Image (cartoon, helix red, strand yellow):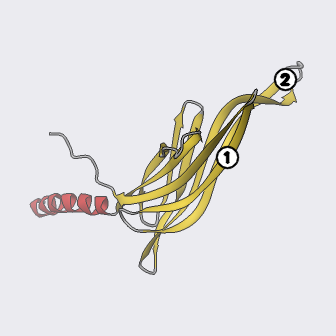
Amino acid sequence: MQKWLLLILVCFPTCGTAAAEDLYLLRLDAIGYDKSSEEPPQEKVMQSIEVVARLNELFHSKVKSGPETQMLSGKMYSKDGELKVRLHYHRLVDVGNVVPVSIDKDGTVITEPVLGRNEIETTVGMKINKATLVGGFETDSERTQGSITTISKSKTHYQLFLSRYEPPAEKR
């Protein structure tokens, strides 16, 4: 009995350490600017979502903040010695408008919110502690009020960053 107890005590810290070593932190940042008329526009992190992932296992993360919902899912795997991440990202924003979708038996109009949507689905090769560009877009818009025309620009590029996950130290 004492031999088994000793074996369990020795194995437990080792197994816990090994499990933490194959955990990774994936973070997807949306970097850019929205409707800026500055020259040059100042880029900043506009949205961010992260998830702890393990090699060869599916991951999923969902963040809801006010009218915005972000979802990141996928799988990280190794192929020919290179880390690969297959990801699917959704960003939904309730823009504040509704559209009628049906009328119930009492004559009440049933509505649903109009959602702005950004989506990325891709597979990329990754290196630890290096950001990888996975998508983006740029737009220019013109607004005229009286005789004044204002030109503004929007730009968003999505960067995926991979690092080893370091669990928080236990408090004693």
Apparent side of residue 166 relative to residue 123 in the rendered image (left or right):
left
Expressed as whole percent of the image width and height from the top left, the position of residue 40 reads 52, 46
Apparent side of residue 115 relative to residue 35 in the rendered image (left or right):
right
Apparent side of residue 113 relative to residue 4 in the rendered image (left or right):
right
Placement of the C terminus among the 4 image quadrants: top left
Expressed as whole percent of the image width and height from the top left, the position of residue 75 reads 51, 62
Residue 140: which disc? Answer: 1
| 88 up-or-down from 43: above or below | below
Would you call the spot at circle 2 few (<14 residues within 10 Å), some (14-19), or many (20 or more)? few
Task: List the single residue furthest toward the front.
Answer: 147
* Residue beneath the point at 44% across and 51% down: 51
Placement of the N terminus among the 4 image quadrants: bottom left
Apparent side of residue 56 relative to residue 92 in the rendered image (left or right):
left
Q: Amino acid at mark 2?
A: Val
**Which SS class for mark 2?**
strand
| 159 up-or-down from 145: above or below | below
Are the two marked residues, 2 and 1, in contact with CB atoms closer than 8 angstroms? no
* Residue beneath the point at 15% across and 57% down: 9
Q: Nearer the viewer, residue 92 or 137?
A: 137
Q: Quadrant of residue 98?
A: top right
* Residue beneath the point at 36% across and 65% down: 128
Residue 109: which disc? Answer: 2
Marks 2 and 1, how far apart in space? Answer: 37 Å
Q: Amino acid at mark 1?
A: Asp
